[in-house]
Image: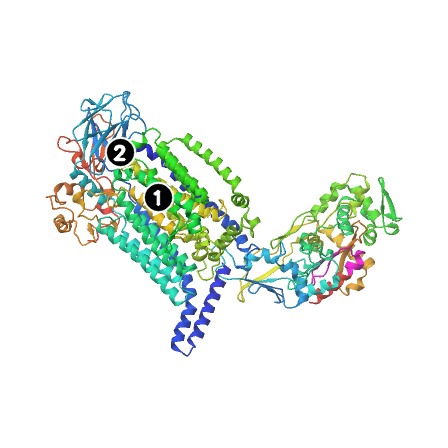
Amino acid sequence: MGELFTRIKVVFTELWADIQSAIANADPGEKVLSVLDAILPVLCGVLRVLAVIVAITVIARCITSLYREKTGREIWGWLTTSDGERLNLHHWENALGRGRWADVALQTPTVSRTHAALLRDHKGNWKLQPLQTKNGTRLNGKLVVHTIPVKTGDVIDLGGVPLEFYAISEEEEREQAMRWGVAERPLSPGRTLAYLMIFQIMMCIQCLPGREGPDMAMIAISFAILAAAMWGMYALYRSLKRTAFEAETIAFFLCTVSFSITAAYSPDSLLRQTICMLMGLVIFFVLSVLLRDLRATVSLRWPVAVLTCLLLIFNVVLGQRLFGAKNWIDLGFISFQPSEFVKIAFIFTGAATLDRLFARRNLLFTVLFCGFCMGCLALMSDFGTALIFFVALLVIAFLRSGDLGFLALMGTAAAAGGWLVLQFKPYIANRFAAWRHVWDFYNESGGYQQTRTMSAIASGGLFGKGTEDAFLKNLGAANTDLVFGVISEEFGLILALCSVFVLLVLAVYAVSRTVNARSSYYVIAANAAAAMLIFQASLNVLGAVDILPLTGVTLPFVSVGGSSMIACWGLLAFIKAADTRPNASFTLRLPKRIRGWIPPDNDAIYGGRYDDGYDYDNFDEYDDYEPYDEYDSYDGYDPGDDDVREWQPRNTRRQDTQVWRRDDPAGGRPETRWQDDDPGALWPQDGESDWEHTIPFRSDNGRKGGNRS
Amino acid sequence: MKRLRGRTAITLLLTAALAAGLVLFCVRLVAHGGEWVGFFGTTYYDAGALYDANGVLLYDGETGSYAEDQATRMATLHLVGDRNFGTSLRSVLSSRLSGYNPITGTTLGSHDVMLTIDSALNRTALEALGGSRGVVAVYNYVTGDVKCLVSSPTYDPNDPPADVNENPAYEGVYLNRFFSGTYPPGSTFKLVTTAAAIEKKGDLDNFRFTCTGSTQIGDGVVTCPYAHGADMTIDQCLACSCNGAYAVLALELGANELDKYMKEAGLQDSLTVDGLHTARGSFDKAEAGSVWLGWSGVGQYNDLVNPCTLLTFMGGIANRGVAVTPELVGREAISGTQIPAALSGGPDTFNIYSSSTCDRLKAMMRNNVVSSYGQEQFGDLPVCAKSGTAEVGGGQQPHAWFAGFVDDPNHPLAFVVLVENGGWGSQTAGGVAAKVLAQAAAG
């Protein structure tokens, strides 16, 4: 502590002396400049601490927004048993059977473990697919062998168990989406973005000291484009009635860090980084829209796979001759690494819908495709990326088959392949020789980079030493392979850890959304994308600090490099597509008539008022939305109708949602039924009068925020 | 779909692995960050400066330059070190020189470190060694401050000799002999044997020995340079360093006692002096009754000591049983503003023999100087000492030792001088000690 106080004393003594001598300067113009010169280093030091605080705020808001509410479950239809029990269909792909993992579990011996599947498409059409033949599947009495359409009122018979099928109507779908739109509002993304923009400004200023005029302009313009892209994308989201922006905010946060280290190293590269980020956004949109229609997506698997193979073959065969490197394609005005785009293609083709999961040898195509890609990457000597592919394959294979034995088999095969590689490429073995002993090789190729990285991280402390005095950035490939160390040195360990931590948040987010996902395609794609990002980050970060061998892969979104940036945005599209919160992803279509209605942000709710200009206490004002409905003519639906008022109490928070309860006449535990369990039509209706309507938890008095009116 | 939910654990597993890796890294960073910043291959943060106790610049990290004066550069080379040195103060202090701490890293700038060394004293010591290989060290046995520390051979770091790696004169030049060397202690080990005898042999005052120049021990003979005389007391035996008498004592005490008393003296421990570790001394327990046990009691056979621990042992005798670990680092400052010292309980100490044993040893060592080595060379300083002449075999001259202390509260100085192949201990090494002590006491 004594040291710290002494240091602060010295800093301020010197600062004061500098300012005094600056003020003594006769020329007023120079006076201002020299005062600025004296203040800037101290200001940057203060900014670095503040930037970390703002960054943590941004991340905390994203996490809060993602996990503040227990995710409710969508219901797309149900099956009614002969004794009146209702079995909800929570997904677009539902497995029916006796097994533990069936989405609709039927505890009858004549039902097979995996008996049949009920599948819905994005247009609301349902199909029944029998998954076995031993215990028959019947539809309205007729034996079903192949997939056939079903509709409300049909009776499905599984091994002698009759089930009446009911698909929710469009109106019920709209009702469900609206109810959720209120219950699961994200934390105001606008405010989070405002914080993020403050962070961007702080980072931008820190990149300025020691730069000449043109470089300064380049840095300022690039950061301005970054901020504009961010706000532009958000505006687009709002106009599409999507309000959840957490994953995108995280990506923009990482882009900001990437821009900062690029600016600190070489402002000239900022232009490419900016263009590539914009291209990444385009890919993100294109993929998100493409993923809307799963049937089309699945049908594109083969063409994409073939194109990918051709691209790789082209590069392996001609890359060296045409561009001087096997793993680059140089088109003159832009050069990119095809392997980065193959990642997207791999997930695109590797993910599968539920019906495929039950098909025999359903993995063969994926395994072959992955094997081909890895082979090409090995020929390009890009073993780090090959490893990432392999891990993605493991994730996809496990999600699709659930077969640990298969994983073990592939692991063994990979180990054998790795051994072969080490035999033929001894320079890779060298990396392993230094692994865990880098300090014994600190001036040799095996340990040079890692020792510098670790040294730089330690020297940066928690808040970094600024962009000007840093040395690590000048090491070869430091801004891609050693980027964790570069961030630590320049902006501090906390920010570097934050940059990795948000990737963990993204991965957990991808996994947590599987509870509700509509199709297994989204689940598998999101998990594979998250696994790729996480594993790549592991190789990059842990490789640079000698916990894993150094493989030379990029840190997602952060490393300087265009192809990687573009590909990461593509991977993000897969993750985002799994988010079934209403108004989160535009991969998921909204029910038609809800499109004119924007669910308000939670932040904006105080005492029954949202700060968006509408008085939600007075439902008549809902009429005001009518003119904004851009999609279809007003069909008579009025959100202010009685039933809406039923499910939307005055101050809607999950805690306040209503439950229905009835006492057990036999004296057992009273049965409760949550409002959310049963959408509209199946709420206690007439004839269920013994249900008592209660409001369970808090009264209005206990509500956080209270009544401000 | 439910089926898939369980399987997503594989993604969480990967996520947990990355999180665990980050935690592991952070733990390692907290534990080793200082070493990482200061690793010797780095040229990035080593920006602080090293000064001696009087403010003489020894090394400036900003410019990478050494002391101005060539004699000072040579006399402090083993402390400051250059790129060829495995360990030196500059390498062990590099994280302090760079101003490292785990919170702010090196971002707050470098520190200046003042050593306790007096570079003028170092110059005198190096000059006194006269080009011989060896060690001279002086420290304050009350505070632990090392006043003088020279290891020879040395060279000018601004002008390293071209043949430094081939020329035998520079053998072991990259070692700081004070910390890293171990040598046969020769007769200085008789202090350990004496201490054991004082405590274990009840009738030591009645001990008499007649030296004929050679003494039959077991199946061999322990020789003295000449016949020391008849009916000598233990004090006389130590003063004339009679090998025969001490071989007899060693046989009486046994190898286990000698080993135990050497350990109690701290001579088999490794000390840590501001991050520099000393080599360990050793004692081979020879067969009981053999001539080798006799030789081991006079500091030959396979006995080895390290100069630094021997110096600390001397300080322990002077301090009546409490040995103070040496310290090399004095104050630290940032841009000339001194950093307030952290509260500490004084220097590190450890106990050696009982105070009465030390008093007896002290009296005997004083007697050595008065009756044998000659007080006149030390002027007014009440020096207590023991010389040593360690045979090294191979037809080479023996190593000359002279170790002891000034028994004066105004000048609480302990010293050790080793001249490799220097010949007769009290003459060669004693002369070096006298010059250095005179200057140290005056300054």
> Which one is nearer the viewer's eye here, A66 or A289?
A289
Q: Is residue A670 above or below residue A68?
A: above
Count up the numbered dots: 2
Which residue occupies the extreme bottom position in the image? A26
Please give the residue where the numbered disc 1 appears in the rendered image: A344
- Quadrant where the C terminus of chain B sits is bottom right
Left or right of residue B341: residue A375: left
Q: Which residues are magenta?
A: B403-430
Q: Position of residue A407 (x, y in %)?
A: 42, 33
> Which one is nearer the viewer's eye here, A193 or A284?
A284
Asked if badges 2 and 1 are on one and the same chain, I answer yes
Q: Is residue A137 above or below residue A679?
A: above
Left or right of residue A637: residue B305: right
The label nearer to you, 2 versus 1, is 1
Left or right of residue B217: residue A64: left
Q: Is residue B355 visible?
A: yes
Q: Is residue A56 visible?
A: no
Which numbered tag is attached to residue A93?
A: 2
> Which one is nearer the viewer's eye here, A236 or B313?
A236
> Which of the chains bears the disc numbered 2?
A
